[in-house]
Image (cartoon, rainbow, N blue to C red):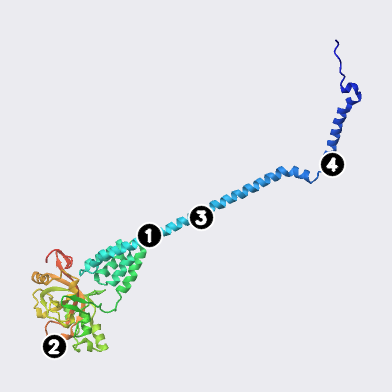
Amino acid sequence: MAEKHNPDLQETHPQLRDVPESLQEGASTIKAKRDDRPKDTWDKFNALSPFVTGLIVAIVGGLFTLSQEHRNSLLKQQERNEANRQAAQDAITKEHQARILELQTIAQLMPFLTSKDENTKQVAITAINELANTNLAIQLAKLNKSPGTVNAVRQIAAQSTKEVDRKLAQAALVELEKPGAGPNKTLLTTEEGECGPEGTGGDKAANLLKNRTDAPQALRDMTIQDVEQLQVFTLPKKRDDWSSEEVERVKQAGDGSGIRIQGYLLRAIRERGSSANCRFKSYVDWHLVLGPSPETPPKEGMVVVAGPRIRISHPKWTFERFQELASAKVPIRVSGWLYFDQAHQGPKFYATLWEVRPAVKIEFFQDQAWLDLDKAKAEP
């Protein structure tokens, strides 16, 4: 049986053949018209949206970067603050430890600083300067003023490698070595009691000079003959009774000045108790009689006085040692204060009323050199 043919729509309706082409042409015409018309706001926004989106992303990224940088800056500032706080704390701790070290140093060296030996005092101040600090050493030297501590300050002023320390020492020496300040005031403490700088029951002005232990800042070399030729005054036997004019006249002649003389020790004499030493029995003056030659009769010599207060600072100044110097007949050299002994006016005991009182340094001549009695190991 023959196959039945079903005609399609175009065969039955030939007019439909041109419809697709017409639709396509219409769509093209509409699109062309749309492309030719002016763009509205939405169209413009659609065109700009990629640029706007990029800009927003850039702004957001920039803000995020700034935020991170600010956060990092705050963190770094916190770290710096913490480092500064720690550094300040470390500095406080270090200073505290330094103060502890200073106190420990002082505690260990205080027995040496209060020693009777001037060399030991000098070493103590020098050690404090090295182990603690210069300012502390100088302040302690001022509080414990003596020949040894003053020498230590001189050493700092001359030898310190730090300019600031040298200037501190130099400024302190202006005060420590101030001329015209008068004799230092001493206290003699013994098992017999205490004796102040003016002694007791005597001539206070004279006793102040007799009991001094400070060293002259300048020395004038004189011979025994020079001293014997100094003017001798007739004055009240107590300096307390002198007028200001009398004080000045004796001063102009040399009283209270530093001198250095040399000769031979003729005799060493233990004196009896005096008002200057509060009449103590064991702590008395020693009179050392010097002459220009070992054959000089003692009555033609002059007196050098080594009192108990000055001997405390010179432990090697023993009576036996002075007797040995007299027996050895070696030249000796004495440094000290020139003093007019007005109390012994009248009968002539020695060649002159002028004395070295007190002596502050004694040397003897041996092996072509002057040896300090405090430091020399060899016997004369």
Q: How far apart, in angstroms, are the residues tagged by discs 3 and 2?
A: 90 Å
In the image, taking residue 274 as reference, residue 13 lies left or right, namely: right
Residue pictured at 51% horizontal, 55% vertical? 77
Q: Earlier in the sequence, mark 3 or mark 4?
A: 4
Asked whether the residues under the numbered discs 1 and 2 touch, taking CB atoms below 8 Å apart as contact, a structural biologist would say: no
In the image, taking residue 31 as reference, residue 325 lies left or right, namely: left
Residue where numbered disc 2 is placed = 346
Q: Is residue 260 visible?
A: no
Q: How far apart, in angstroms, are the residues tagged by discs 1 and 4?
A: 85 Å
Q: How far apart, in angstroms, are the residues tagged by discs 3 and 4?
A: 61 Å
Residue where numbered disc 3 is placed = 77
**In front: 136, or 231?**
136
Question: Of helix, strand and loop, which one carries label 2?
Answer: loop
The amino acid on which the numbered mark 2 sits, given as a three-letter code, is Gly
Q: Earlier in the sequence, mark 1 or mark 4?
A: 4
Q: Quadrant of the C terminus?
A: bottom left
Quadrant in which residue 171 is drawn: bottom left
Mark 4 is surrounded, within 10 Å at the Cα level, by few (under 14), some (14 to 19) or many (20 or more) other residues, namely few
The image position of residue 1, as x and y in percent, is 85, 10
Quadrant in which residue 117 is drawn: bottom left
Residue furthest out toward the top? 1
- Callout in the foreground (3, 2): 3
Mark 2 is surrounded, within 10 Å at the Cα level, by few (under 14), some (14 to 19) or many (20 or more) other residues, namely few
Residue where numbered disc 1 is placed = 93
Q: Earlier in the sequence, mark 1 or mark 2?
A: 1
Residue furthest out toward the front? 1
Residue where numbered disc 4 is placed = 37
Question: Of helix, strand and loop, which one carries label 4?
Answer: loop
